[in-house]
């Protein structure tokens, strides 16, 4: 096991590119203004201070890329993880673009790996803060060039980010995630435990926390367990807990507390779609507000909630409690 100490004036990209064995990197507090890909396996990044150890960048979806195209959502990340068993701890990852209504999506953290853990971290952006791969199947086809559409070609998104064999489990513990629209999105089985989701002011009026794209064959989707959904400036009743990015997106909300910015309806079906017929959204023991959930979401029993918790606990033990 290698142990490295890094300061903001060091070249973190160069350091990561030379890793050949399990490595723990201690980051001194300060701002690391860099766009970072963590491709090595078994890397742990530990910040000196959660709020003042910051990896920041400012790409956005409508920004012109050197290839002549726009960046698109998935090239805007500040940090992208493709290595397995990466852990980030006690730091902040931020996309500092704050105008998604004119500049488009702006990802802070993109996790394109099967196994990943974040604890005691802040993830900051506005629209599309956190992506948890895999991609939905139709986007894999589109971005890999396996289509006759001349506007896409192989290489738009690197293969190590686009493809994922098998399932993925991502674990977020005691994290704070800031955003406005779809600021947790993707298709991983992901556990958010004791996390806080802070909805910022959205100039377009309506916000959404989660936008899952799980396939029908996936048994586990997103689990928000003992989380707080806090108001960071959003209008009362203007934010939905989730909307399905693809037909069978799956979210479960258990033992969570909601501030007044969360709509009594809780969920949205996604624009002019029929995803209210196929989305798999459920909840149990939510606290706060006069709730009147949409009829297509399911309030589950405590017994069923415990079964779901046990399923995620088994994954946590398998991958992280060794």
Image: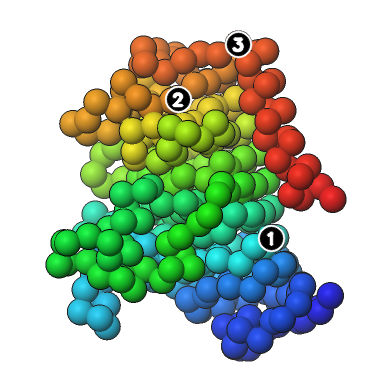
Q: What residue is disc 1 on?
A: 85
Contact (CB < 8 A) between labels 3 and 2? no
Q: Depth check: 219 or 132 in front?
A: 219
Q: Earlier in the sequence, mark 3 or mark 2?
A: 2
Contact (CB < 8 A) between labels 1 and 2? no
> Judging from the image, what secondary structure is the residue with disc 1 in?
loop
Q: Depth check: 200 or 315 in front?
A: 315
Give the Cα separation between the discs numbered 1 and 3: 33 Å
Q: Residue at x 58, y 73 (%)?
A: 39
Give the Cα separation between the discs numbered 1 and 2: 28 Å
Q: Residue at x 71, y 81 (%)?
A: 20
Left or right: 109 in relation to 322: left
Q: Residue at x 22, y 60 (%)?
A: 147
User: Relative to 270, is 287 above or below?
Assistant: above
Which numbered dot is residue 301?
A: 3
Q: Residue at x 52, y 75 (%)?
A: 36
Q: Earlier in the sequence, mark 1 or mark 2?
A: 1
Pointer 1 local density, CA inside 10 Å: few below 14, some 14–19, many at least 20: many
Residue 237 in percent (x, y) is at 36, 27
Residue 19 in percent (x, y) is at 69, 81
Residue 217 in percent (x, y) is at 47, 34
Q: Quadrant of residue 148?
A: bottom left
Front: mark 1 or 2: 1
Q: What residue is disc 2 on?
A: 281
Front: mark 1 or 3: 1
Does the image show residue 254?
Answer: yes
């Amino acid at each position: 096991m290698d142990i490295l100490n890094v300061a903001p004036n060091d070249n973190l990209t160069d350091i990561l590119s030379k890793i050949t064995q399990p490595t723990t990197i201690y980051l001194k507090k300060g701002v690391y203004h860099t766009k970072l890909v963590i491709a090595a396996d078994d890397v742990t990044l530990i910040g000196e201070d959660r709020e003042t150890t910051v990896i920041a960048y400012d790409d956005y979806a409508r920004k012109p890329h050197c290839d002549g195209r726009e960046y698109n959502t998935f090239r805007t990340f500040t940090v992208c993880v493709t290595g397995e068993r990466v852990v980030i701890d006690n730091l902040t990852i931020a996309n500092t673009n704050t105008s998604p209504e004119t500049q488009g999506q702006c990802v802070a953290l993109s996790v394109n790996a099967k196994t990943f853990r974040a604890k005691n971290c802040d993830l900051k952006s506005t629209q599309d803060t956190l992506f948890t791969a895999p991609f939905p199947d139709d986007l894999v086809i589109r971005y890999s060039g396996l289509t006759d559409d001349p506007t896409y070609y192989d290489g738009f998104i690197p293969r190590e980010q686009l493809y994922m064999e098998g399932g993925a489990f991502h674990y977020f513990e005691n994290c704070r995630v800031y955003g406005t629209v779809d600021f947790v999105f993707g298709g991983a089985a992901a556990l958010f435990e004791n996390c806080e989701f802070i909805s910022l002011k959205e100039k377009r009026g309506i916000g959404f926390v989660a936008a899952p794209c799980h396939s029908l064959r996936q048994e586990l989707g997103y689990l928000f367990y003992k989380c707080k959904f806090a108001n960071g400036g959003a209008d009362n009743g203007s934010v939905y807990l989730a909307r399905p990015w693809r037909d069978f997106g799956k979210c479960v909300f258990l033992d969570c507390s909601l501030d007044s910015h969360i709509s009594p309806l809780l969920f949205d079906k996604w624009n002019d779609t029929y995803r209210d017929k196929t989305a798999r959204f459920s909840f149990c023991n939510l606290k706060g507000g006069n709730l009147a959930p949409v009829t297509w979401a399911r309030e589950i029993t405590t017994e069923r909630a415990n079964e779901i918790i046990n399923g995620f606990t088994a994954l946590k033990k398998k991958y992280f409690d060794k």
